Amino acid sequence: MITIEGLQNAGRLSSLQDAFLAEGAVQCGFCIPGMVMAAHALLAENPRPTETDVREGLSGNLCRCAGYQRIVAAVLTAARGATGGR
Amino acid sequence: MSARRVGGHERVTGQQEFVGDIRLDGMLHVKLISIDCAHARIHRIDAERARSLPGVRDVVCAGDLPAPMPRFGPVYQDRPVLAAAETRFHGEPVAAVVAETEQLAEEAAALVEVHYEELPQSRQSPLRST
């Protein structure tokens, strides 16, 4: 079982964690561990998700800041990075 | 690259602490008690069984608080701390159990009996278009 504390590799952020920061997807942070781990699981199963896939994959997680646009953008950015092309 | 939010690193690595993570020496835990009815007149709250559990410090009811009931709210301070005499929405707290652990507070909360009478309720959503 992996939790948010275990996503870093030798102190370096995963590309997904980095994408959350780069896209400004982190606001108050309350939902972020759940969002990142749901996205991590989604990308493990589906490395090239569509926007609809991402929204579906994160649908069990609520963001009290209502910052969904940038969270979805961050996951799509991470997915593009993971497959080598932007 | 655009500027990154201060504190963002802590929030994507699980290091950010929230209020629920705070632990203080001797801190107590509170569970709020509500009833399954939006609008009701509270007749009596029987909390003796809950109070008798070891580790339960108190069960606070409306009558234990100052009158008029203190009110709170993020913008308008219009919400009674506990429903005084009547509840006005589903889930409005009518009592608070104070205990030494969260689990104990939950156990004690289940033992509190609220005797109430249902009053007329509006079942129309205020969001429904007219």
Image (cartoon, grey):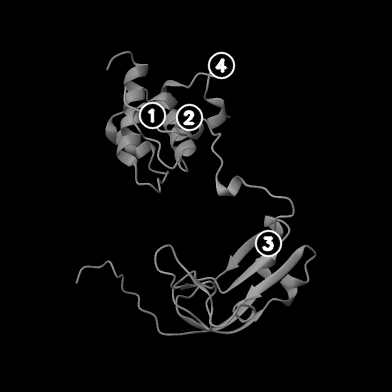
Question: Secondary structure beneath disc 1?
Answer: loop
Q: Which chain is disc 1 placed on?
A: B
Q: Residues within 10 Å of mark 4 (few under 14, many from 20)?
A: few
**Marks 2 and 1 belong to one chain:** yes
Identified at 62% across, 63% down, the residue is: B31
Quadrant of the frame with the C terminus of chain B: bottom left
Q: Nearer the viewer, residue A19 or B19?
A: B19
- The answer to whether mark 2 and mark 1 are in CB contact below 8 A is yes
Residue B73 percent coordinates (x, y): 45, 66
Q: Which chain is disc 2 placed on?
A: B
Identified at 33% across, 13% down, the residue is: A84
Residue A38 shown left or right of residue B56 in the figure = left
Q: Which mark is residue B105?
A: 3
Q: Amino acid at mark 2?
A: His
Question: Secondary structure beneath disc 4?
Answer: loop
Q: Which residue is mark 4?
A: A10
